[in-house]
Image (cartoon, helix red, strand yellow):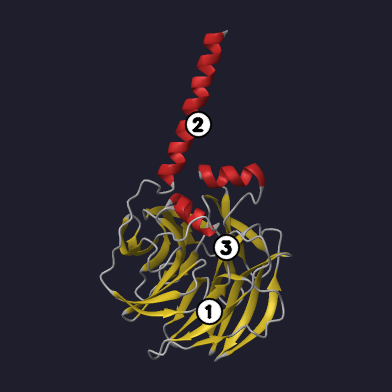
Amino acid sequence: MRRRFVKIALLVLIVFLGYVFYTLQSTGFFRTVENHFEGSVLKQIPLQGAEDITISHTDNFALVSSTKRNIYPPTEEESGGLYKLDLQNNSFTTIHLSKSFSKPFAPHGISMFKKDGAYTVLSVNHTKNGHSIEKFRLIGDSLIFEKTYSHPSMISPNDVVLIDQNRFYFTNDHGYTKGMGKFFEEYLGLSVSNVVYFDGTDFIEVADGIAYANGINFDPSKNLLYVASPRGFEIKVYSRNPDGTLTFTEDIPCGTGVDNIEIDPKGNIWTAGHPNLLRFKAYAKGNKTAAPSEIIKVTYRKKGDYTAESIFVDKGDLMSGSSVATPFQDMILTGNVMDNKFLILKN
C-alpha cells in the first residue's frame, strides 16, 4: 500500500514539474534579454497606455488608442481616448479626437479604412458594462460617433481590422474569462480563442484553436489575414475566401509574445511584444517595475518563404510592455500597454 502511494506521489510530482517547466519554457522565462537597437530614440510622447497605433501613409498621421491603465486586467473602470498624431513635421502634435464621446470609453485595438476622403474608424471598448466595438467617422480632425456593435460573440475582444466601411474581423483573446478555465488557458497555453467576422449583417466565427488571439490585420494585396498568438510566440496566416471565411495557411515563429500587427506599404509585417510573458504579467499586475519589449519585422513573400528579424529589444529601460510597432519613413512608432509614454524611434 505504501509503495503504491509513493508511486502515485512521484507520478503527481513528475507531472507537476513537467507542467512548471513547460509553462516557464513556453512563456520565454529562460530567454536572456539584452538591449539591442541600431537606431536612436527621436521622441517620447507623453501619452499613457498607447496600446495600439495605426498609420495613414497617404495623409501622414497616426491614430493612437490610449487608455490609462494602472494594472491589467483592470479591477476598476478605465478611461482613455483616441488621439491623432501629426507626422508631417517633427512637432508630433497630438489631438484628442474622442473627448466629446459621451459613453464610458477605454479603447483597445483599433482599425481605420479610408474611402471618399473620410476614414471609418473602429475601436474595441471595454467598460464595466461589457465589451463592444465603437464605430466612428474621421474627417480631418473631427471624429464623429456612428454606432456601437455588441454581440454575445464578443467574449473578450482584443483587436479589430476593417475590410471595408461595414465589414470587419475581431479577435477574442480568451475562450474562458474567469475561474480555472482561464487559469489553465493562460498557463498551459490552451488554444481556445478565436476570430469572428462581421459580414455587415451577422457575426460568424471563422477561425478557432488559437492560443490567446491578439493583434489582427489584413493585407489586401496578398489577400492574407494575420493573427498574433502571443502565447504561441507566433503569427498565424490565413487566406481570405470570397465569403469572408478563412483558410489556415501556416504559422510564422517569432520567438516573442507578439501583440498587435501592422503592415507597411511594402507588405512587411511589424509587431511588438513581450519576450518574457511571465515578467510582463507581473509588471501588468504591479508586482514588477518594468518588463522587456521587442519589435519584430517579418518579410513574408509566400507560404514557407519568410524571414523574421528582431529590430529592437529593451529590458524595460526605455519602455516596458511593448504592444505595437509601425514604421513611417525612417521612423518607428512603438506603443505599450501601460507606460506613461510611447516612443518614436529613428531607424
| Percent x, y of residue 232 | 45, 50
Secondary structure type for disc 3 = strand
The reply to whether dot 3 and dot 2 touch (C-beta < 8 Å) is: no
| Percent x, y of residue 152 | 71, 59
Instruction: Relative to 17, say whether 256 is above or below.
Output: below
Q: Nearer the viewer, residue 202 or 179?
A: 179
- Give how far apart the Cα atoms at labels 2 and 1 are: 48 Å
Residue 271: image quadrant is bottom left
Which disc, if any, is residue 113? Answer: 1
Q: Nearer the viewer, mark 2 or mark 1?
A: 2
Between discs 2 and 1, the one toward the N terminus: 2
Which disc, if any, is residue 158? Answer: 3
Check disc 2 and give the amino acid type: Phe
Q: Which residue is mark 2?
A: 16
Horizontal side of 218 relative to 81 (left or right) equals left
Instruction: Relative to 7, say whether 106 is above or below.
Output: below
